[in-house]
């Protein structure tokens, strides 16, 4: 398992002000929706720019799922990141009301 300083999960919370609020699998398919996720940062050690861009179609969305935790805390307090699980998802637990 490789060790890296961090992994990043970017989330968009869907609230009434979100452009995705009220959308369903059917409405996204009907509009042939697609999404572009772009991340720009600076790698601190070499001060090098790091850029990533990925596009997703409406049929890439896995409804009712979330990404699994890929961090493991080691006995020395450091974290290990398992990038082999980066695409794994799990069911979202029901909301507590």
Image (cartoon, helix red, strand yellow):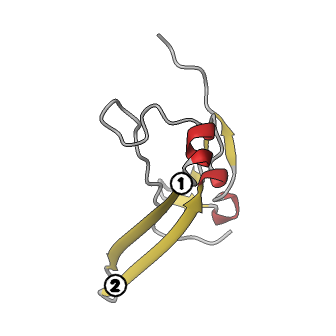
In the image, which disc is placed on residue 49?
2
The residue closer to the viewer here, 42 or 3, is 42
Tell me where residue 77 appears, x and y as whole percent: 47, 53
Q: In which quarter of the image is residue 25?
A: top right
Tell me where residue 83 appears, x and y as whole percent: 63, 65
The residue at 54%/49% (across/down) is: 31
Q: In which quarter of the image is residue 63?
A: top right
Can the viewer see residue 30?
yes
Under tag 2, what secondary structure? strand
Can the viewer see residue 6?
no
Residue farthest to the front?
Answer: 30
Along the horizontal axis of the image, is 92 left or right of 7?
right
Under tag 1, what secondary structure? loop
Give the spatial CA distance, label 2 vs label 1.
Answer: 30 Å
Q: Name the residue under label 1.
A: 33
N-terminal-most mark, 2 or 1:
1
Labels 2 & 1 near each other (Cβ < 8 A): no
Query: Looking at the image, is 63 positioned above or below residue 51?
Result: above
The residue closer to the viewer here, 62 or 17, is 17
| Mark toward the viewer: 2 or 1 | 1
Along the horizontal axis of the image, is 57 left or right of 76?
right
């Amino acid at each position: 398992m490789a060790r890296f300083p961090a992994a990043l999960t970017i989330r968009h919370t869907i609230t009434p002000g979100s452009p995705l609020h009220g959308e369903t699998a059917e409405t996204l398919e009907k509009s042939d929706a697609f999404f572009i996720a772009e991340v720009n940062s600076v790698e601190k050690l070499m001060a090098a720019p790091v850029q990533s861009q990925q596009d997703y179609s409406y049929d890439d969305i896995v409804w009712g799922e979330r990404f699994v935790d890929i961090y493991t805390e080691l006995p020395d307090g450091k974290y290990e990141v398992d990038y082999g699980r980066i695409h794994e998802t799990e069911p979202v637990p029901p909301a507590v009301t």
